[in-house]
Image: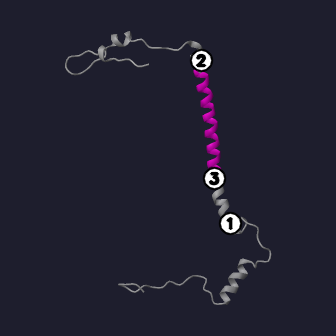
Amino acid sequence: MYYDIIPWLTGTTGRAKLTQGVLNALPIAVPPKTEIIEIVRRVKTLFAFADRIEARLVTAQKTVERLTPATLAKAFRGELVPQDPNDEPAADLLARLKSEGFAATPTKTRRKKGGLP
């Protein structure tokens, strides 16, 4: 409900005042008691629903926090996709690459000062 309170304001110094008497005289609409009870019931239901959603959110966040490290661990163990039993083990592959002359760590090349290599 909206009231045009400008006519109710008092004061002559450019500073408007709204007195207690004026506020007491303004009508304030209040719904019937049955409607108030229904509003309160619906608000409680919505708050309970919001609490359940928040609990699910907290559970989901905890699951995500555990899932990321677990996924990385599985990736490094090779458990995310089915493995080919014909593939050689990683240790054997690394040993073979080393014996064939492939360096385990890449060597850095230095750039010349003052320009491109």
Amino acid type, residue under disc 1 in the picture: Ala
Amino acid type, residue under disc 3 in the picture: Val
Q: Position of residue 82 (x, y in %)?
A: 76, 67
Amino acid type, residue under disc 2 in the picture: Ile
Indicate left or right for 87 with 107 as reference: right
* Chain-order first, disc 1 or disc 2: 2
Q: Which residues are magenta?
A: 39-64
Which secondary structure, mark 2?
Answer: helix
Along the line of sight, the residue nearer the viewer: 2 or 78: 2
Question: Can you identify the residue that label 3 sits on?
Answer: 64
Question: Are circles 1 and 2 on residues that touch, CB within 8 Å?
Answer: no
Along the line of sight, the residue nearer the viewer: 6 or 107: 6
Question: Can you identify the residue that label 2 sits on?
Answer: 37
Q: Position of residue 19 (x, y in %)?
A: 31, 14
Real-space Cα distance between discs 3 and 2? 41 Å
Identified at 79% across, 77% down, the residue is 86
* Chain-order first, disc 3 or disc 2: 2
Question: Are circles 3 and 1 on residues that touch, CB within 8 Å?
Answer: no
Identified at 26% across, 15% down, the residue is 10
Identified at 71% across, 79% down, the residue is 91
Real-space Cα distance between discs 1 and 2? 56 Å
Question: Can you identify the residue that label 1 sits on?
Answer: 75
Identified at 60% across, 86% down, the residue is 103
